[in-house]
Image (spheres, helix red, strand yellow):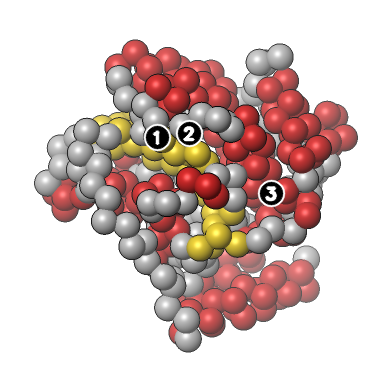
């Protein structure tokens, strides 16, 4: 376990040190969003909060889709004060509960006439099970967002041109989809060690990329486009539930080598706002530019099967 953490820490440090030499690009879009409505999941902290701040500054009505009301309302106060935009509202969403996802979608569709951009931002590295018995990382990082997107697709189509942006990670290159494990354990892997959780995280990020790949095919000939992305090595709270040794090993590396949430939000904003990328629907972005994927991350058969399995796990088929 210790050796594995050292290896991971070394790889992360090597990547992180590049930030001293290469400045991460910024979203160059000057788009304004007055009259537009955006949902950002997990927007009370980190990249999500920074994304919501930028969108509010551009005039959007921003729906803060979060589990923790107290933290979300504190973030909303910050955003309103910083941007002067009072159209920033909290709507409860617990991605670890499929019922909560359905309730959120129902409440949103009843109360909000528009949806122009859906940003699937929330993510975690945490053990345990969701309220539906799924692996927590799989349930929150992929399945909850899958259901949310599917339930809101008709509204996105009505309001097009519109976009779905899903925050993945470079970690997807280390991921794989074990359909046998999904069938037997409702999870992407077994085990609760720090290394096992890291592997599950990578698997879930591959799910994000494959989901976007398949979604683009299903949205062909519509006015909705979709994108997945790697935000970069960012200082966020995503690893707050990791074990003591993992946090101890990685803390100094993160502090020294990783960049802030504002830098981390730039590729999300690029995918949500940049003009002229509609033809790149379904593609994966990093550093505000499209990036080629390994074969496993754009496998049509695996992407289609993951969609079908996800529908079954959500009780949709």
Q: CA distance from mark 2 to mark 3?
A: 22 Å
Q: Where is mark 3, residue-wise?
A: 206
How many marks the image carries: the answer is 3
Residue that mark 2 sits on: 224
Q: Of 316 and 131, which appears nearest the observer? A: 316
Q: Residue at x 23, y 47 (%)?
A: 32
> In the rendered view of the protein, which quadrant contains the N terminus?
bottom right
How far from the left and from the top, in percent, is residue 258?
48, 72
Q: Quadrant of residue 301?
A: top right
Disc 1 + disc 2, Cβ < 8 Å? yes
- Taking the spot 71% from the left edge, 75% from the top edge, the residue there is 6
Q: Earlier in the sequence, mark 3 or mark 1?
A: 1
Specify whether residue 285 is in view.
yes
Residue 84 location (% of width, % of height): 12, 46
Badge number at residue 104: none
Specify the farthest residue to the right.
180
Disc 2 or 3, which lies upstream in sequence? 3
């Amino acid at each position: 376990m210790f050796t594995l953490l050292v290896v991971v820490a070394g790889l992360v440090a090597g990547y992180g040190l590049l930030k001293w030499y290469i400045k991460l690009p910024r979203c160059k879009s000057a788009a304004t969003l007055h009259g537009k409505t955006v949902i950002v999941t997990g927007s009370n902290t980190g990249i999500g909060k920074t994304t919501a701040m930028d969108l509010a500054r551009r005039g959007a009505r921003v729906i803060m889709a979060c589990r923790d009301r107290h933290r979300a309302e504190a973030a909303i106060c910050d955003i309103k004060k910083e941007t002067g935009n009072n159209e920033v509202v909290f709507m409860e969403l617990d991605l670890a509960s499929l019922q909560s996802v359905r309730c959120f979608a129902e409440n949103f569709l009843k109360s909000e006439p528009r949806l122009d951009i859906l940003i699937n931002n929330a993510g975690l590295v945490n053990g345990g099970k969701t309220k539906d018995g799924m692996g927590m990382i799989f349930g929150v990082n992929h399945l909850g967002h899958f259901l949310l997107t599917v339930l809101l697709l008709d509204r996105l189509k009505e309001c097009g041109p519109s976009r779905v942006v899903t925050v993945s990670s470079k970690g997807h290159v280390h991921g794989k989809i074990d359909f046998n494990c999904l069938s037997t354990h409702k999870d992407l892997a077994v085990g609760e060690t720090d290394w096992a959780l890291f592997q599950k995280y990578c698997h879930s990020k591959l799910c994000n990329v494959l989901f976007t790949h398949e979604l683009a095919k299903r949205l062909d000939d519509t006015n909705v486009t979709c994108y997945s992305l790697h935000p970069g090595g960012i200082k966020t709270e995503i690893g707050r539930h990791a074990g003591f040794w993992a946090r101890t090993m990685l803390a100094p590396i993160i502090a020294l080598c990783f960049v802030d949430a504002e830098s981390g939000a730039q590729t999300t904003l690029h995918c949500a706002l940049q003009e002229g990328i509609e033809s790149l629907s379904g593609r994966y972005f990093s550093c505000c530019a499209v990036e080629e994927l390994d074969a496993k991350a754009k496998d049509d058969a695996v992407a289609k099967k993951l969609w079908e399995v996800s529908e079954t796990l959500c009780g949709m088929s």
